[in-house]
Image: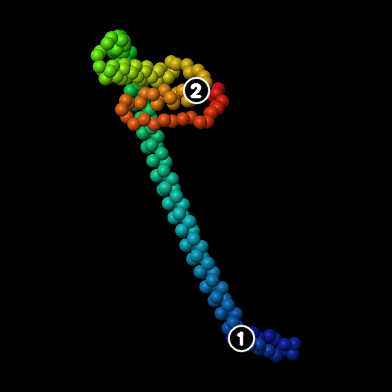
Amino acid sequence: MHISERRTKDGGYVSVGTDITRIKEHEHKLVDNDMRLRATRDRSENVRRTALEQQAIELADLAEKYSQEKNRAEEANQTKSKFLANMSHELAHRRSMPSSAFPRSWEAACSETLGSEKYQEYCHDILTSGHYLLEVINDILDMSKIEAGRMKLDMEPLDLSKTAGGIAARGIRGAPTTRTWCSRRISMKPFR
């Protein structure tokens, strides 16, 4: 209860009593709500801060993983470059040796009569493999030239069906064969 006194004009007092129980209850509710709101806000800020800290940790982990993978890729590229340089050197050095004469000697041997048709097939397989091996060696040399920037590449049209047919023709004798047909024309604009 709240009592307030007032003076009257004739010098007396008037006391007025007001029941403020509801106002006090409302004040307590407001204070409680304010305290709960502040606690909720504090918890929310803590959760947000924790989430931000967690995101920062995850981003740091991702950056570290990215850096490690980038280093691995760079190391792999350096290893490839060293391999190509070494292979190029070795192959260029050995090219003057009889390895390039290998297919020529088998061409001569295949032109002679070897007797059985089976031996002719073996001879043909050896000759085809020798030519393929020389192509692989030349491709490795070309890759090392490209890697070193000593080869200029020119764009030219490519007959995809011929290329695919050539790849299929290099199959291993006796292996199951499959036929692949290119039924669509592929047109590509040359890169410039």
Sequence-wise first label, 2 or 1:
1
Q: In the image shown, does 72 or 182 lie closer to the viewer?
A: 182
Q: Secondary structure at mark 1?
A: loop
Judge left or right: residue 102 versus residue 149.
left
Locate the C terminus and report the quarter of the image it occupies.
top right
Name the residue that disc number 2 marks.
159
Locate the N terminus and report the quarter of the image it occupies.
bottom right
Q: In the image shown, does 148 or 154 lie closer to the viewer?
A: 154
Query: Which label belongs to residue 51?
Result: none
Name the residue that disc number 1 marks.
19
Name above or below for residue 61 compared with residue 151.
below
Q: In the image shown, does 63 or 26 lie closer to the viewer?
A: 63
Which x, y percent locates residue 38?
A: 51, 65
Which dot, 2 or 1, sits closer to the camera?
2
User: What is the C-alpha distance between the residues marked 2 and 1?
Assistant: 101 Å
Q: Residue furthest front?
A: 116
